[in-house]
Amino acid sequence: MRLSRRSVVAGMAGGAALGGCGLLDEPPMPGTLGGADFTRGHRLREGRFPVFSDERSAQILIVGGGIAGLSAAWALAEAGISDFRLLELEDSTGGNARSGRNAVSAYPLGAHYLPLPNAEAVAVIRLLERLRLITGWQGGKPVYDPYALVSDPDERMLHLGKWQEGLVPSTGLSASDSHDLAAFFAAMRNFRDHVGKDGKPAFALPMALSSHDPELLALDRLSFAQWLDAQGWRSPILRTHVRYCCRDDYGTEPHQVSAWAGIHYFASRRGLAANTDPDTVLTWPEGNGHLAHALARRVRGQIAPGQIVHAVKAEGGVMVDSYDVATKRTIRWHGSAAILATPRFVTARLLPPCSAEHFAYAPWLTAAVTLDRLPAGPGAQLAWDNVSWTSDSLGYVVNTHQSLSSVPGPTVLTWYLPLSEPAPADARRIMLKRSLAEWQAIIEADILQTNPDLKGAIRRIDPWRWGHAMIRPEPGFFFSGAREAAARPQPPIFFAHSDLSGLSLFEEANYRGTLAAEGAMTHLGIDHSSLLAPL
């Protein structure tokens, strides 16, 4: 029989072997073991690329095709510029917003929703207008395409053997639990509405627009767990919810998350909408792959995939060397400016003496789980996002939830597990060492513990490994100077990635990409209207 979830996940820190446990006695589960192409990444680390045998040119070169790089390309296209190339390591763009598809449904491989943007996220709002996801305005608020708004019910949680609506337990609470929860959420509302001494919102999106009031910046010197301790809030219900939220957005435990980042998670969202609640999210079967595909379609003629960029130099403009995986040749690109939309640990290899010190990244495992019927369970009905209070995973989203079909049928879940307890390097080694069958056993056991009704209904499991899924917003990272220095342009080279914000969010990647593109255009004397200008 298969291992229990608890016994398998408990072996994560030590990388426990699964052999001899009966796992190999069962017929293999259909599926493939995928992920970000670590072999190409390791090739960059090892070096030894051939000397260039081809030379090409473009006015602006973008390195990296995640949301930041795609947003930079979009900004250039909006300005009427076509003389640019986006060089991407993988065979497809999108970064951790990539998606997949099978015969049943499209599904996200990582990021799966976009909260309604704040008023200050003007580039995102302009993008959503261009994509017709904002269909008009009423009373100064955007009207959203109803088909993109998450369908009800949107969230449920398995607690004390029964599904309930929402992600905070509503039953079995002690008086101290109720007190701490009420006090915590009141404090988060106060932070959300607070304006710093400089007149800026305490917590904004993009984060660069947040207040620099010293009292607020001081929160970065504490961990979120330490800040909660200082408030005297020790309810295990509150602490478990906070842990879920930190792992959900940051892939990191609360004692390793800056208090500034932890509060930002709860206090930064002030979405505007004329036709829905401000805390509604936008989602699609493929998650944020919908947005990544839309960005890429606009500039598909300028994208060069399968390029391992291994050197960048500023020499009378810029010179970029990339190894073309298909032809096994190095191409030397010449340009007038470059945008490095790469995570900092990659930038440090491409452009010495750039440093990745203080930048740490969280590894994740996700999986597409194909079922021949929808999950069920006692209590609240099936939701888009489904979480178990006792699981180390973050549960699953139902990718057919947005379907208009009234006839239940097969579905695809996307299951999420941040590998947050081991040190990141150890977690990455374990992640790569484990076989397809071992990961499938972990995922199947977790799903069946949450939904025993699915026994016999799982048709295939396709795990996906993210070695460096997102930046870890550790204490001291935001305002110690390292992040700000890394974001500072070095014309003709500009930098764009969500890790320069310390938050792996679509809004941050979009902001950094747009900012870098507009910096490059200004440097080159290209006239353009700013997508970051107030609406």
Image (tube, grey):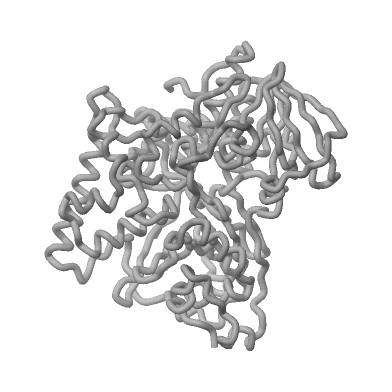
Residue appearing at x 77%, y 44% in the figure: 48
Q: Is residue 319 above or below residue 453?
A: above
Left or right of 71 on screen, residue 259? left
Nearer to the camera, 240 or 259: 259
Q: Is residue 400 above or below residue 212?
A: below
| Quadrant in the picture for the C terminus | top left
Nearer to the camera, 218 or 260: 218
Left or right of 386 on screen, residue 88? right
The total number of labels drawn is 0
Residue 284: x, y in percent?
Answer: 53, 51
| Quadrant in the picture for the N terminus | bottom right
Residue appearing at x 76%, y 24% in the figure: 334
Q: Is residue 369 visible?
A: yes
Residue 405: x, y in percent?
Answer: 54, 62
Residue appearing at x 73%, y 26% in the figure: 319
Residue appearing at x 54%, y 36% in the figure: 355
Residue 264: x, y in percent?
Answer: 33, 42
Residue 296: x, y in percent?
Answer: 66, 39
Q: Is residue 279 above or below residue 157?
A: above
